[in-house]
Every structure is written in C-alpha cells, then in structure tokens.
Amino acid sequence: MLTQFISTKIASKITDTAPSVGVTKSRCLPMRFSAHPCTECVDICPHHAITLEPELAIDYQRCSECMLCTAVCPADALWGTNVNFQKTIQALKTRPQPVLGCDRCSEADQTISCLGILSEAHLLALFSELKTTVQLNLTPCQTCKNHFILEYLNANLAAVAENLGINLSEKIQLVEDPSQLHYQPETYDRRDFFVAFRSKIQHNIAAMMESEPKPEEESVRYSAKTLPFKKKLLNQACAKLPENLQSRFKTFYNYEVTIGDECDLCWDCVAICPTEALFSETGEDSQETLQFNPDFCTGCDLCKEFCPLDVITINRYAQTHDPQHAATPDVGIDS
C-alpha cells in the first residue's frame, strides 16, 4: 500500500545512520567462552563481513544487510535493529490475504528489512499464528543484491516441512511472479490516508525502537541470562500447534541435557548457561539440586564445553527418545 511504502521509506531515512544488523558481543557464544566452536555467522556471510577475532565485529562497508547472520545466530548476538516481528505478525493477522515483503516492496501489508532474516523459528511463527495463507513477496529479489537469500529461505521452508511432516506451502507461499501476488491494498479517503500514514510512521519507528533484543554494549554483561528471541518464537509456535504435532515439533526443536553420575555440583554449567536452562534448586531437605528446563535450552553446548569433568551430554530430543515420536501425524492442520 502507498502509506506502507512511503512510511517505510521515511523510517529508513531516519535509521540510515544506524546499520540494520545490531551486535551484542556479550551474547556471542565464543565471546562468552573462547573455546566454543560456533562460527555460524562467519560461515553464512557471503561477503566475509563478520569476524570473531579478536571479538565479534561486522565490517559494515562489506555488509549488504541480507540478515542471514541474524537468522542463524543461536544466541541473538546479531539481530535486526529495526525489526519487531511480533508486531509484524499481529498486523498481518488483520489482513484477509496477508503479504509480507522487504523494505523495497511497495506491494506488501508489512515489510521487514530483508526476508533473509526469516529463520525456521520465524517461519514456524507465521505458520502457527496466521489463520490464512501468507505470501512472501519476493518480486524485488530478482534485481536485488541479496537475491541469494532465496536459496536459504527455500532451505528453511523445506526443513520445517520435513521436520513437521506437513505441506507448508498451504500456509506460506513464496511469490516471485508479480501476477501471482494476491495483494489487496487498503483504500482511504483523503482524511483516512493521512491518519493511516501517521499510524504507519509510528508503527515503523516503534518497531525500530522496540526491536528484539535490546543492545547492551554500554555495560557488557557476560553473566546475563537472556532467552533468544528465536527460542521465544519456537516456544510460542509449539504451544499453538495441534497436540498431534507438538511431540513431533519437540523431536526437532527441543534439546535434552544429561548429567553424568560423576558430577560434583561445581555449578560451572549453571554459571555459563546463557538462558538459565540449567539452574539450581533447593529442596525441602535444604539440599541444592541441578535442574534443567528444556523450554529455555537452545542447544548451544556451552555447558558441555565448559564442564571441567566432561560429564554433560546434550542432544536433540529426537536422539534420546523413541523414533515413533517422529512419525508423520495422522491429523491435518486446522487452517
């Protein structure tokens, strides 16, 4: 719609001085523990704009803002500075045939900086939250410098479809041909146009100011416990799925931690865990015990890497449970 396009352009001018990818070094796994092997962002960046030596940093002269690094970062150390995905979903819910596009799109109900930001967690959120089919407007990708994000977006969609055993195209459609786009612009009279225009400006600026997560570089807190936004999306998506799909969901998106009998309760794992998935609990007998919350675990392996006795094992839920949990469900998805 015109108001969406104009307000996005104005908001982008306001934020031109700030990069689309934010960096919170204290959340980076190798920054929290130097021996951690995570190099997801470095490996996926097509322009070699990211380095982990001597610390996490982005060369913004090389960065094309494809947002792929934010999609793969397991800890929200890299994140979209002007993206509020929760508000985007809520706005898409109000549209009869919702269309999501990038900031270059003029034919989209909602836009985000680049569709490369859409991880499996984001796609699962769209799938579980929206009652109608959402189209991802990829028509600008043909002439965009970030056209390569299509490969990753298709791979993420295929992974979600395979993991859950569903036909995801019934709820999320990738549209590259403009003639297949079902975009229905809102219509306004003169007064309503300016009211809507002001509302869109406020929405875009609010998204910029309230994006997840918040930067904390002024006081780098390596002991902070923060649940990554993508894990929050996964938890919310799982809760909204039909019961027959929830067990299958957990086999691919939840983790389990096993502590060996040799554990001496040094609590190093509790200290290093960035999400408080591992925590101590005092029982009625005043004895402290080590507890695990799978809803907070991202499978980052920090506890395993940091354990001085090497008695921690971490696996995807599917690796520790009967394979029948991964069987294709008999019941379909409610639309």
Image (cartoon, grey):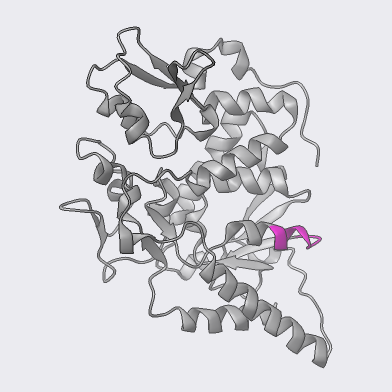
Q: Which residues are magenta?
A: 90-97
Q: Position of residue 279 (x, y in %)?
A: 44, 28
Q: Residue furthest bottom?
A: 190
| Residue at 32%, 35% in the rendered image | 272
Q: Position of residue 331 (x, y in %)?
A: 78, 25
Q: Nearer the viewer, residue 167 or 2?
A: 2
Asked whether residue 171 is drawn in magenta, I would say: no
Q: Quadrant of residue 218?
A: bottom left
Q: Is residue 118 left or right of residue 335?
A: left
Q: Is residue 135 above or below residue 74?
A: below
Q: Residue at x 25, y 42 (%)?
A: 30
Q: Which quadrant does the C terminus fall into?
A: top right
Query: Does 92 lie within the magenta span?
Result: yes
- Tell me if residue 331 can be seen: yes
Along the line of sight, the residue nearer the viewer: 47 or 315: 315
Q: Residue furthest left?
A: 54
Q: What is the residue that sits farthest to the right in this orientation?
A: 189
Residue 4 can be seen in this image? no
Q: Residue at x 57, y 48 (%)?
A: 122
Q: Is residue 113 left or right of residue 87?
A: left
In this figure, what is the number of numbered marks? 0
Q: Residue 94 appears in which quarter of the rendering? A: bottom right
Specify the quadrant that holds the N terminus: bottom right
Image coords of residue 302 (percent x, y): 32, 32
Instruction: Establish if 38 lies above or below 41.
Output: above
Position above or below: 90 against 246: below
Side of 223 where 209 appears, left or right: right
Q: Position of residue 92 (x, y in %)?
A: 71, 60
Front residue (pair 195, 281): 281
